[in-house]
Each structure stands twice: as C-alpha cells, then as structure tokens.
Image (spheres, rainbow, N blue to C red):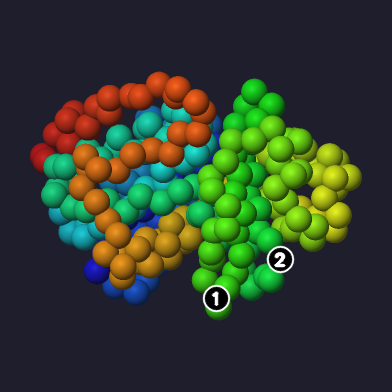
C-alpha cells in the first residue's frame, strides 16, 4: 500500500509518504512560497522513490483549521490529484495531526494555533489505551474563553503558545508548554492517522472532502481542481 499525505495549513509544508510499511517524511518551511513549491516537492518525492503518480493508493490531507490560503492550496492540490488519478482522499484535522506530537501522557493535550484577530484555534485530547481521543470540538476562541476550557496540568503546544505564553502560565495551573519543535504538524503523524482511517474505511471522493473553517461566514472557495488534475493526467 502507498499513501501520500500533506499538511499545508501552517508556514511548513509537511509531506509524508507510506510505502509498504516504511514512512518517509519531509518538513519544509515555505512561508509564502507554498504555491510554487508544493507540486514540485510532491513530484520530486515520487521520483526519489521511483513512483509514478498512479502508484499512489490513497491521498491524505490536513484540512485545517489554519492558514486560509494554505488550506485552500493544499486541499485543491490533493483534490486535483484524486480526481485525475481516481484515488480516495483521507481528510484529517490539522489539530489532530498536531496533538499527536505528544506521546504517552495522561494529561490533557491541548494544541493551540494562531487564528489571527486575537483568536486561537484549539481542541482538547486525551491518550486512552495508546490512542488519541478528542474530548472537545474544534473551537475558535478568545484567550479568555480558552482559559475556561482547559484544566490544570495541561500540555500545550502550537504557535499560539508563543504568543500567549505568559498568560497561559499565569491562568492555567501547572501548564506545560512544549518547545517550538512541537508547535507544528509532523508529516509522520499524517501517515499514522491516515492508516487508522483506512482501517476503518473512512475515506472520500474529492467532491466530498471539505476544509475545516471555524470563522463564521467564512467565504467558500470554488476549488480549481480541474487544472491541477490535468497536470497529473499527463
């Protein structure tokens, strides 16, 4: 089985590949260069493994919440590939991917992502029996609302932790803020979560997968999948 997975919802392009029990990952800080680098990076990774585009069995993609532009670019690319190659998509919340940066802890695991406008994206997780269980919905919160949701001794990670570090340590008793290395999604987590969903047959066509937008009345973008699909048909 072969899986290609990406997350483009932060300043990093996370590319994960599963090739018959082997996981390869590539995490690249792209800033504003995502659109120009994404398809090229995917092609180079496939070439390095000797894959043709149609060798992929499943495509996985981070759905957000996160950068509005990043979500659009990544999902449009995966939808285009899915449509052209007739391959299913596994959609995964970026907060789920981020939460898996914490392993083997009994504490609350709380990813927080900067949503701009003095807001954060967040959810809450627990490790139960070696599995990550989400105990709260995906949320768009003010920092004060966030403090009402999180219990003491929580493990907090994500780029918003850097913005609100002092307030978090003051308002959440025993809070532990992870280092910057854990603030962004990791490509191997995309693959691991995709494998879990494949076992449960939780995958979709390109026309069923939707991004996770939490801002009210977020504008809906008509994904330009046809021109991307044509690129992979050649």
Whether residue 188 is visible: yes
Q: Secondary structure at mark 1?
A: loop
Q: Residue at x 57, y 41 (%)?
A: 139
Mark 2 residue crowding within 10 angstroms, few (<14) / some (14–19) / many (20+): some
Could you give the CA–CA distance between mark 1 and mark 2, rounded to whole angstroms?
Answer: 13 Å
**Quadrant placement of the N terminus:** bottom left
Query: Residue at the spot x=40%, y=21% of the render?
Result: 219
Q: Is residue 182 above or below residue 229?
A: below
Query: Residue at label 2?
Result: 107
161 with respect to 26 (left or right): right
Q: Residue at x 35, y 63 (%)?
A: 197
Whole-percent x and y of residue 207?
21, 40
Asked if residue 28 can be seen in this view, the reply is no
Q: Quadrant of residue 51?
A: bottom left
Q: Secondary structure at mark 2?
A: loop
Residue 47 image position (x, y, % from top left): 26, 53
Q: Most extreme residue toward the left, as rendered?
A: 234
Quick check: 141 above or below 153? above
- Residue at the right extreme of this rendering: 170
Q: Bin the neighbour count of mark 1 within 10 Å (Cα to Cα): few under 14, some 14-19, many 20 and up.
A: few
Q: Residue 164 vs residue 139: left or right?
A: right
Q: Is residue 112 left or right of residue 192?
A: right
- Report x, y in % for residue 101: 59, 60
Q: Which residue is mark 1?
A: 130
Question: Between residues 138 and 189, which one lies in front from this camera angle?
Answer: 138
Q: Earlier in the sequence, mark 1 or mark 2?
A: 2
Q: Nearer the viewer, residue 139 or 70?
A: 139
Q: Quadrant of the C terminus?
A: top left
């Amino acid at each position: 089985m072969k899986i290609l997975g990406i997350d483009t919802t932060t300043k990093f392009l996370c590319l994960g590949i599963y090739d018959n029990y082997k996981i390869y990952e590539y995490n690249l800080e792209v800033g504003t260069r995502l659109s120009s680098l994404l398809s090229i990076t995917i092609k180079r990774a496939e070439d390095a493994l000797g894959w043709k585009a149609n060798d992929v069995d499943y495509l996985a993609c981070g759905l957000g919440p996160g950068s509005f532009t990043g979500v659009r670019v990544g999902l449009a690319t995966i939808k285009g590939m899915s449509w052209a190659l007739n391959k299913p998509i596994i959609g995964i919340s970026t907060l789920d991917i981020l939460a898996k940066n914490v392993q083997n802890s009994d504490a609350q695991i709380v990813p927080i992502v900067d949503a701009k406008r003095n807001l954060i994206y967040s959810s809450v997780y627990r490790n139960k029996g070696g599995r990550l269980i989400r105990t709260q919905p995906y949320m768009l919160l003010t920092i004060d609302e966030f403090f009402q949701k999180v219990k003491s001794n929580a493990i907090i990670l994500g780029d918003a932790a850097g913005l609100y570090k002092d307030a978090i340590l003051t308002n959440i008793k025993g809070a532990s803020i992870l280092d910057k290395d854990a603030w962004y999604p990791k490509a191997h987590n995309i693959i691991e979560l995709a494998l879990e969903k494949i076992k449960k047959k939780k995958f979709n066509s390109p026309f069923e997968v939707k991004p996770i937008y939490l801002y009210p009345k977020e504008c809906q973008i008509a994904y330009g999948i046809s021109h991307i699909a044509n690129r992979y048909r050649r």
